[in-house]
Image (cartoon, helix red, strand yellow):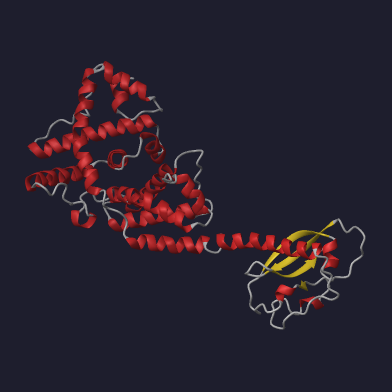
Amino acid sequence: MKPPESDHQLFERLRAGQEPAFLALYHKRQPALYRFALQMSGSTSIAEDITQDVFLALLRDECGFDPDRGSLIAYLFGIARKLLLRQYERRRSEMPVDTGGEETGLAEPVDASDPLTDLAARERIAALRRAVASLPRRYREVVVLCDLEEVDYADAAEALGCPIGTVRSRLHRARLMLADKLRDERHGGDAVPAWKAAGCAI
Amino acid sequence: MNCEEYWNESAGPEPEEDFDAHLAACPACAARYAASGSVAPDLRLLAAAMKHISAPPGVEAQLLRAYREQYGRRARPARDARWWWAAAAALLLAASALFTGARAPHPPQVAANSPVAGIEEEENAFTALPNAAGSAQDEDVDLVRVELPRSAITALGIPASDEGEAESVEAEVLVGPDGMARAVRFLN
């Protein structure tokens, strides 16, 4: 069986005018980019615009992608992030954090075999989704990239324009924030955020 | 690496080993790290619940339109391939004329509606080839520049001296959509 083409091979072919390569790359990478934009913006219309603009940027003669400097997926997420930042600046505030499940299509059942499991899973997912959406942007983007879209640390670092160590630090802090938020929601308490207290002397 | 460096944003690209070494040496941070991992199963559930989400078809349609506008005119791979076949066909035609020793006393007649009709009258104009007969007026032709032996000039019935027959001359060949040469013009 013929191995699937790499992003770079598809990129080379699409730049040579081969439409099937463009469609293949679009179908391969569009869902993750769209979901990233959706999670970061909370708006389907913004997510659509961002997805479209990312691929339009790729078509430009001077798109700026250099395979020697990094992967195409990191480049695409980097473009998406820059476009999202422009959106933030335009709005002069953070994007809405509480997005409706109906609008984003996030309220899908997880396990339809057991109604109780399904209900519990739905509730956990809904709570986690709210928690992710309420994270500050810099923490939300690493969670969406690394935990939800499974982008590796190196590509995430390139897309975010920061060192790998920063990605890792942010991700750990973001997960602690999420754990705190979920615990608070379950118990209704105001627990001290674990990530704020150092608690050791090293 | 201390606790603050571990949990706060790093200033530089610390290697992964530094993080692992700190966790191994610091029970408090190891406990916090374990707590941060407690959300991992739910994050996996959330990721799975979102897998079906993708951009609506309208985005693809608009991008495809943009792609065709930008690359449709430029690349034309099928036409490029035809161009090379046409060049090869033109060379074959000239070569066959040489080796069969076909010396037409006059350039062949060209149909009135041929795309190369009338071009012979100009100085250094194209000479119609037999393939031009019957070709359509609005036929889409390609211009191919080739090198031919000097003897091809006389082989095609064009008056020329016999000196230096083995030398190469540059020529332009008009090639039809079927890959056959329609007309030729020698440049030097």
Instruction: Please name the residue shown 29% across and 42% down the image.
Output: A144
Of A82 and B57, nearer the camera is B57
Is the C terminus of chain B in the top left, top right, bottom left or bottom right quadrant? bottom right
Picture coordinates of residue A24, whole percent (x, y): 41, 53
Q: Tell me where residue A73 sits by quadrant.
A: top left
Looking at the image, can residue B188 be seen? no
Of A179 and A32, nearer the camera is A32
Is the N terminus of chain B in the top left, top right, bottom left or bottom right quadrant? top left
The correct choice, above or below, for A173 with respect to B164 in the image is above
Q: Tell me where residue B163 sits by quadrant.
A: bottom right
Picture coordinates of residue A175, whole percent (x, y): 23, 34
The correct choice, above or below, for A161 with respect to A10 in the image is above
Picture coordinates of residue B48, whole percent (x, y): 23, 45
Asked whether, in this view, residue A107 is left or right of residue A50, the answer is left
Asked whether, in this view, residue B179 is left or right of residue B120, the answer is left
The correct choice, above or below, for A202 with respect to B152 in the image is above
Looking at the image, can residue B54 be seen? yes
Asked whether, in this view, residue A179 is left or right of residue B7, the answer is left
Q: Tell me where residue A77 sits by quadrant.
A: top left
Asked whether, in this view, residue A103 is left or right of residue A30, the answer is left
Task: Please tell me how many numbered marks the rendered image carries.
Answer: 0
Picture coordinates of residue A195, whole percent (x, y): 22, 29
Instruction: Please name the residue shown 63% across and 69% down the image.
Output: B178
Of A29 and B4, nearer the camera is A29
